[in-house]
Amino acid sequence: MSAPDLVIGGVAVPLGTIVDVELDVGRLPNHTRLNLPVRIVRGSKPGPTVWISAAIHGDELNGVEIVRRVLDSVDPKRLRGTLLVVPIVNVHGFLTQSRYLPDGRDLNRSFPGSTKGSLAARLAKLFMDEIVEKCSYGIDLHTGSGDRTNLPQVRADMDDPDVQRLAIAFGAPAILHSRVRDGSLREAATSLGIKTLLFEGGEARRFEEDVIVMGVKGVRRVLAELEMIRLKVPDTKRCWYARKSTWLRSGRSGLLRMAVRLGDEVRKGQVVARIANPLGDDEFVVKSTVAGLIIGAARNPVLYQGDAVVHVAHGAEEPCGFDPKAITKKKAGTNKVGAKTSEAQGDGAPKPAAKKKSKKAQ
Ligand SMILES: [Zn+2]
């Protein structure tokens, strides 16, 4: 059987093989060469080409370990199709344990990039040309940013039936509908017709076992849904499906005492946190402006006014199961809580505290 050529970084990848390629990212200021390692697992049977990437934000590490374990579980002789796996996309940020590149730019706001642009734009362009454009599907792995942690969740354009099917297959505790217009990898890939999921889980600079296990299972379920690997029938669990999300912010500087945990369901008006001075005086109470699910939370108790406290997913009528029909039905549901809210964002970072946002915390 003849198969179309697959060439990554100038290296041909035959069927039924695992090939490691180092893409040339340029040099560090001391003239050391810097490479972007890619592992290609090309199955012996035909199937889709999927990329799996982690650490686009250089300090988000759970995905790096998820990628390693997924690779460990895949046999190229049994695989249908091809995996292009990049455990650390932001090689610069990873070295300095930073979300950003040395030029201060966020790589996930620099797509699709260009060969003549900033350092971030050039890396984005390389990733698009060598990886993304060769794929039909992609999974991008993230964690919460800065001192924030995220409930394991999938972010996806749930208005696209193919993406919706894969998001449900992933089996994370929550799915957040989001369309992106922000220079992210997901936006750039989606604009090329490539179906993309973003997984968020845990916090930066950690390996968190529960998140990693969930991420590995989720990625493998998606590969099974694409019929690239075989799995036993996955367990059906309830998940939260939300059309919107809102960051509740601190109205005052102080020390944070959280009253809820990730995964808690909250009512509108429920107290989610208290912020007070170091002796506990001058207490400011943060109440939820919506009914929903806590999907993100601050980890650092030291806060300024306007800082993000918790992230609440909402806009679905109720939790739903892994039934695409149920999801489609929920999608039509109205947002009963009706707060001034935004569509979910593309990654784990809250928008900067600005304008009306800070008023959402009460
Ligand atoms: Zn991220």
Image (cartoon, grey):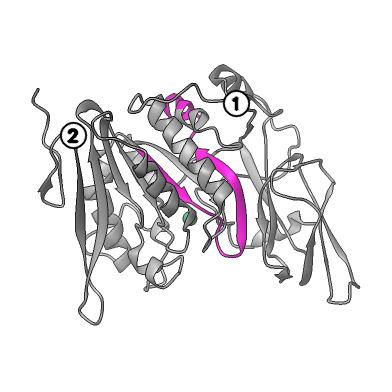
Residue 44, x across and y down, in percent: 19, 29
| Residue that numbered label 2 is attached to | 16
Compared with 346, 357 (above or below) is below
Give SS at disc 2: loop
Q: Residue at x 38, y 60 (%)?
A: 107
| Residue that numbered label 1 is attached to | 331
Residue 32, x across and y down, in percent: 21, 76
Task: Check if residue 265 falls in the magenta segment.
Answer: no
In space, the residues marked 2 and 1 are separated at their CA atoms by 41 Å
Give SS at disc 1: helix
Quadrant housing residue 327:
top right
**Within 10 Å of the Cα at label 1, are there few (<14), some (14-19), or many (20+) other Cα atoms?**
some
Compared with 35, 168 (above or below) is above
Q: Residue at x 56, y 54 (%)?
A: 208
| Left or right: 129 as drawn, with respect to 184 | left
Q: Amino acid at mark 2?
A: Gly
Q: Nearer the viewer, mark 2 or mark 1?
A: 2
Compared with 110, 42 (above or below) is above
